[in-house]
Amino acid sequence: MGLVIRNWQMVFIAVGLPGLLAAVLMRSVPEPPRRGRMQAGSGHKAAPVGEIVRYLFANWKLYAPMFFGLAFSALETYGVQSWRPTFFIRTYGWTAQQAGMAMGVSSIGAQLLGLVIGTWLTERLARRHDDANMRVVAIMYTISPIFAILGPLMPNPWLAVACAAVTGMCGLAGAVPQNAAMQSVTPNDMRGQITAFYLFVFVVIGNGLGPSFIAAITDLIVRDESLIRYGLAGSAAGDVAAGGHHHLAGRQAVWARDNGAEGAGRLIGAAWPKA
């Protein structure tokens, strides 16, 4: 029996192929010199896993808000992405094709705009504030809950699409400085492993629990599948608000570290300089 590739499978292949090309091109990028290492003379060796775990626990006041904020953000992001087509179908009577086209076109434009806005705002604030990265994250997660909650409650589908676009724009505008903030407070020889754990939290919590969380709200609290809009709004109210709280806490911790404040200012210590 010959190999049969269906049309929907070709979509995944077409999307994945550019990633392979990018991976090959990265082989030509020289490794930059590493600064701010925890251990002098460690060359290109990464820190042992046990040492990284101890470091995270020792500096939990700095990292915990970032990881918890990420977890709640991922819960909302993956959950909404899984249920939004169903929301448009059940709430407004759209077909899957209509929902997919509207969501696809709007999300492309919104997320590209989010990258530009997030980068521009971070660079602008960095001229005056040491905690510019987390400050932008806090700003974006203050704006996004408004549209994340109102979107599913809109009286017509196009207003819901517009709210979803703004939510996605804010999410991506905050995602890049959020990761940059973590990189800026992490020693060079631990950045790869801690980033991997950071992404692990995002995928496992978001993909594993996000869709089920919204389904649970709809089934157990709303108790009406046709009213999934309230499940989406309830999830946004809880997840984004909790994530925003932790992002604000993370901003305060980063500010304290950079300004040598009592307590949190000693979290990183003088063992490594800023990169």
Image (tube, rainbow, N blue to C red):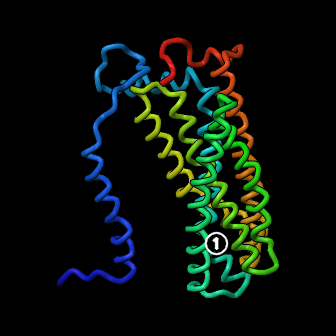
As drawn, is 52 to the left or to the right of 172? left
In the rendered image of this protein, does residue 58 appear above or below residue 129?
A: above
Residue at position x 66%, y 15% in the image: 260
As drawn, is 150 to the left or to the right of 56? right
Percent across and percent down for residue 134 are 65, 37
The residue that label 1 is drawn on is 84
In the rendered image of this protein, does residue 243 appear above or below residue 249?
A: below
Quarter of the image for residue 116 reads bottom right
Quarter of the image for residue 75 reads bottom right
For label 1, count other residues whose C-alpha is less than 10 Å away and answer few (under 14), some (14-19) or many (20+): many
Percent across and percent down for residue 235 are 72, 59
Q: Can residue 65 be seen in this view?
A: no
In the image as oriented, which residue stretches furthest toward the left? 1
Percent across and percent down for residue 92 are 73, 84
Residue at position x 73%, y 80% in the image: 157
Q: What element carries label 1?
A: helix
As drawn, is 112 to the left or to the right of 166? left
Residue at position x 59%, y 39% in the image: 67
In the rendered image of this protein, does residue 180 appear above or below residue 82?
A: above
Between 78 and 253, the one lying in front of the other is 253
Between 134 and 66, the one lying in front of the other is 134
In the rendered image of this protein, does residue 46 appear above or below residue 135?
A: above
Q: Can residue 187 be seen in this view?
A: yes
Quarter of the picture holding the N terminus: bottom left
Quarter of the image for residue 127 reads top right
Percent across and percent down for residue 39 are 38, 15
Name the kind of residue labelled 1 in the image: Arg
Residue at position x 29%, y 59% in the image: 21
